[in-house]
Amino acid sequence: MLSFIKKMFFWSYGRSTWQYDVLCALILVFIFLTPKGWFESGERAHWAKHQKASTAVTRLLIEPDKVSMKSGTPDLERRVQELTGRADARIKKARPLKNGAGEIVVYEVDIK
C-alpha cells in the first residue's frame, strides 16, 4: 500500500499503463466536478461579490451641435440612448467642457 501511494505521489507510472490513465481521469474529474464554492472564500470572494453589486459608469463625449440644451437634459438623454443603443441609459452627470474662449466644445456625460 505504501509503495502504491509513493508511486502515485511521485507519478512514477509510465504513460501506457492503466494506472496512469486512472490518475489522469481522477485529475480531470477533480477539475470539472469540484464545486465552485470550495474556492470562494476569503478576501477575494468578498471583493468579487461587491464588484458585481456596483453599477458601472460609462463616460461619453457628445458634440454640442448634436444636442439642443434649450430643452435641458431630455434631448441629451435621448442622444445618449441613440449612441449606446440602450433605452434604459440614464445620465448620472453631464458637464460642458469649454475652450479658452468660453465656447462649449463637448459635453462630458457619465451614464449608468
Image (cartoon, rainbow, N blue to C red):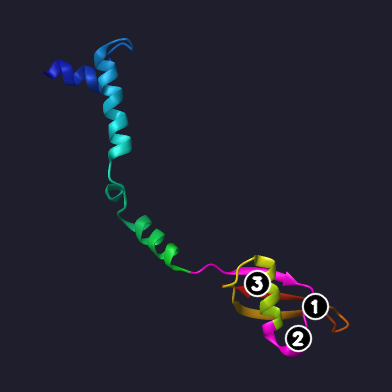
Q: Secondary structure at mark 3?
A: helix
Which mark's residue is nearer the viewer, 3 or 2? Answer: 3
Say above or below: 44 vs 92: above
Mark sitting earlier along the chain (1/3): 1
Mark sitting earlier along the chain (2/1): 1
User: Do the CB atoms of the residues marked 2 and 1 lie less than 8 Å apart?
Assistant: yes
Residue at x-position 80% and y-position 78%: 64
Residue at x-position 32% and y-position 36%: 31
According to the image, label 2 marks what residue? Answer: 69
Residue 81 badge: 3
According to the image, label 1 marks what residue? Answer: 64
Say above or below: 29 vs 96: above
Say above or below: 18 vs 56: above
Question: Which quadrant would residue 83 be assigned to in this image?
Answer: bottom right
How far separated are the C-alphas under marks 2 and 1?
8 Å
Mark 2, other Cα within 10 Å: few <14 / some 14–19 / many ≥20:
few
Q: Residue 10 appears at what percent x and percent y?
A: 27, 20
Query: Range of the magenta residues?
Result: 55-74
